[in-house]
């Protein structure tokens, strides 16, 4: 019989056992929340810690026993029943072996729990439905983000588990289309009906859409591919969103660095003016970690600031009660569209949002593939130009099929022109 993990001895010397426990990995990491995963891992570590503490206690007690003698341990099992367990040398070796075995399984448990806490669940967290301001909705309704791209998805193994990704070999851009056509959150009418999900999308969907616009609008700063400058459309449609992002950064930094408040305010004001002036402003403040949102010099990661600044707040925010009522409406409207099948009030909202997220993902993967081709061609042309510039000059006489040029007198090696000039020289001109 396997020896259960038991508790540490009490100060009186009697053993106060705990419930038997297995520290093996829980059933399916994908079905646990982060809180549950952390609780499972902590429980496993705590039980192992108790078991490790018992090893020297048991060893010292068993050392005083004869070969065939055993000591008796009393404990209460999970059902509340009093139990007794006899431990001798053989049982002690079994106990130590069990502890070692469970310790070896701990890395796997930790890895499984890591994957659990890193797992992204559609419809939760960054992918949860949110209502966005009319500025965001209007912007994505007309922004250039390339064509609709069709294709399939496949499962890809990653260090954090299986991930659903577009299959690059199946991607096909649809000529004459715009991605905006399948961004339903920007459309007040769908399928001839009022759109119940107008203005409602997940923050996780907007991030790749911003990146697509940055590419097609040519927002990358020459020589600094990792930095962007807002497009003209952003400066008109998202001016307030950018002001909100700048102000949010300023408020956060002033709370953390109150001594720098005046300088932070000055920088924020200059950045706000630069939305229209396009003036380059240094958004990094000495002594302040981080930088304010800079419309003319920001990294891709700062799209998340616009994402947050563009969400509806207060009474305009999407409440849980409203979201619950949207399911039936969305199923009724979108269920009439051929691309949506099997919609129910429970899954309709997430299904529509996921469809838009998939469209953005396919378009983003296609864009990345095209960009990679262009980058390779550009680098090949640059290398060819460098090789041509570094190649040594080839003498004319050395060209295939070309003999040495005739020597010309007057210049180094010049032998004179044939005929009159060689004999009489150039004519003399006398001014009148």
Image: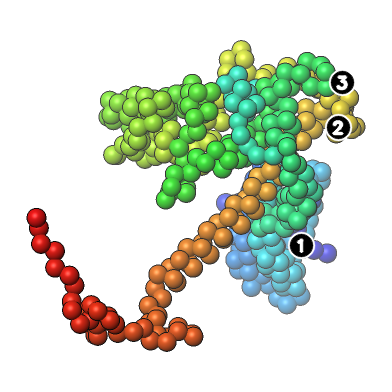
CB atoms of marks 3 and 1 within 8 Å: no
- Placement of 220 over or under 344, stated as above or below: below
Left or right: residue 25 compared with residue 256 = right
Q: Quadrant of residue 412?
A: bottom left
The residue identified by callout 1 is 3
| Residue 241 appears in the picture as rendered | no
Give the farthest residue toward the top: 315
The residue identified by callout 3 is 332
Q: Earlier in the sequence, mark 1 or mark 2?
A: 1
The residue identified by callout 2 is 340
**In-front residue for pair 266/220:** 220
Residue 218 point in image, percent of width and height: 52, 41
CB atoms of marks 1 and 2 within 8 Å: no
Mark in the foreground, 3 or 1: 3
The residue located at (24%, 85%) in the rendering is 415
**In-front residue for pair 240/217:** 217
| Residue 374 appears in the picture as rendered | yes
Callout 1 crowding tier (Cα within 10 Å): few <14, some 14–19, many ≥20: some
Residue 348 point in image, percent of width and height: 82, 28
Residue 292 point in image, percent of width and height: 40, 33
Q: Calculate the distance from the C-alpha at mark 2 to the C-alpha at mark 3.
A: 11 Å
Residue 360 point in image, percent of width and height: 69, 39
Q: Calculate the distance from the C-alpha at mark 3 to the C-alpha at mark 1.
A: 59 Å
Callout 3 crowding tier (Cα within 10 Å): few <14, some 14–19, many ≥20: some
The residue located at (9%, 58%) in the rendering is 431
Q: Earlier in the sequence, mark 3 or mark 1?
A: 1
Mark in the foreground, 1 or 2: 2
Q: Earlier in the sequence, mark 2 or mark 3?
A: 3
**In-front residue for pair 364/257:** 364
């Amino acid at each position: 019989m396997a020896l259960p993990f038991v508790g540490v001895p009490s100060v009186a010397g009697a053993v106060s056992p705990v419930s038997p426990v297995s520290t093996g990995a829980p059933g399916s990491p994908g079905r646990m929340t982060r809180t549950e995963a952390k609780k499972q891992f902590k429980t496993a570590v705590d039980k192992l810690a108790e078991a490790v503490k018992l090893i020297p206690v048991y060893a010292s007690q068993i050392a005083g026993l004869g070969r065939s003698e055993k000591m008796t341990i009393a404990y209460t099992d999970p059902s509340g029943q009093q139990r007794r367990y006899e431990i001798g040398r053989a049982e002690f070796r079994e106990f130590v072996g069990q502890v070692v075995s469970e310790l070896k399984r701990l890395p796997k448990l930790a890895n499984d729990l890591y994957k659990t806490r890193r797992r992204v669940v559609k419809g939760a967290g960054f992918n949860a439905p949110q209502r966005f301001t009319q500025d965001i909705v209007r912007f994505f309704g007309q922004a250039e983000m390339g064509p609709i791209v069709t294709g399939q998805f496949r499962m890809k193994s990653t260090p954090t588990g299986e991930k659903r990704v577009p299959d690059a070999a199946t991607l096909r851009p649809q000529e004459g289309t715009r991605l905006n056509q399948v961004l339903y959150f920007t459309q007040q009418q769908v399928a001839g009906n009022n759109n119940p999900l107008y203005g409602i999308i997940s923050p996780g969907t907007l991030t790749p859409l911003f990146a697509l616009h940055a590419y097609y609008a040519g927002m990358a700063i020459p020589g600094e591919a990792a930095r962007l400058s807002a497009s003209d459309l952003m400066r008109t449609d998202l001016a307030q969103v950018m002001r909100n992002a700048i102000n949010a950064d300023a408020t956060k930094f002033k709370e953390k660095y109150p001594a720098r408040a005046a300088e932070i305010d000055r920088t924020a004001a200059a950045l706000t003016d630069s939305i229209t002036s396009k003036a380059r402003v240094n958004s990094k403040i000495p002594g302040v970690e981080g930088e304010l949102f800079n419309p003319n010099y920001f990294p891709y990661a700062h799209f998340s600031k616009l994402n947050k600044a563009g969400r509806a707040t207060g009474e305009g925010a999407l409440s849980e009660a409203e979201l619950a009522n949207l399911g039936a409406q969305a199923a009724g409207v979108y269920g009439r569209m051929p691309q949506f099948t099997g919609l129910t009030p429970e899954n309709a909202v997430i299904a529509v949002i996921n469809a838009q997220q998939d469209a953005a993902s396919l378009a983003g993967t296609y864009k990345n593939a095209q960009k990679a081709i262009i980058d390779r061609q550009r680098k090949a042309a640059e290398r060819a130009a460098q090789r041509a510039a570094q190649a040594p000059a080839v003498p004319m006489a050395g060209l295939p099929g070309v003999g040495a040029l005739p020597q010309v007198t007057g210049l180094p090696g010049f032998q004179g022109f044939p005929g009159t000039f060689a004999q009489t020289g150039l004519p003399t001109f006398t001014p009148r």
